[in-house]
Image (cartoon, helix red, strand yellow):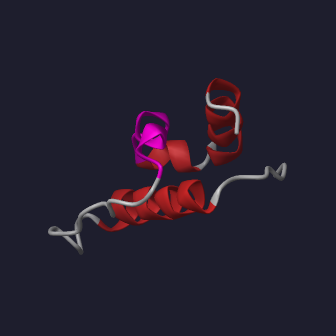
Amino acid sequence: MSHYIVSHSLKERIVDKIVLLNFETYLPHYCLQRFGDSRFDPFLKDKEDIMKLDKIVENFLNEYPN
C-alpha cells in the first residue's frame, strides 16, 4: 500500500466510513461523525471499495489536493 499524507479529518472519515460499512448490521443506529471530511463519502460507497482503499485515497487526493 502506498503512503499518503492525509489530514486528520480525512483519516477520521475513512475510519468512520469503514466502521459504518462493515458493522451496519451490528450497529444499526451508528451515524457518521460530523467533523470528518464528508467530501470523501462518495469515494467509499460499499464494502468492496475497502479493498481498493489505496486507489480511492489517491483519487480523492487528486480531486481535492491539500
Q: Main SS of the magenta segment?
A: helix
Residue at (71, 36) in percent of width and height = 58
Q: Specify the farthest residue to the left.
A: 29
22 in relation to 2, above or below: below
* Vertical comparison of 20 with 66: above or below: below
Q: In this image, 20 relative to 16: left or right? A: left
- Provide residue 7's location: percent of width, then percent of height: 65, 55
Quadrant for the C terminus in the image: top right
| 41 inside magenta stretch | yes
Q: Residue at the spot x=46%, y=60% of the render?
A: 18
Image side of residue 12 versus residue 66, left or right? left
Residue at 70% from the left image edge and 52% from the top image edge: 6
| Magenta region includes residue 64 | no
Query: x%, y% of residue 49?
Result: 52, 42
Which residue is the extreme one toward the right? Answer: 2
Position of residue 5 measured from the top left corner of the image (x, y, whole percent): 78, 52
Q: Is residue 66 above or below residue 15?
A: above
Dividing the picture into quadrants, the one containing residue 30 is: bottom left
**Residue lying farthest to the top in this orientation:** 63
Count of numbered circles on the image: 0
Identified at 84% across, 49% down, the residue is: 2
Q: Is residue 66 left or right of residue 49?
A: right
In the image, 17 versus 21, the foreground residue is 17
| Of 62 and 23, the residue lying toward us | 62
Residue, far bottom = 26
Magenta span of residues: 37-46
Q: Is residue 46 left or right of residue 26?
A: right
- Residue 23: x %, y % from top left: 33, 68
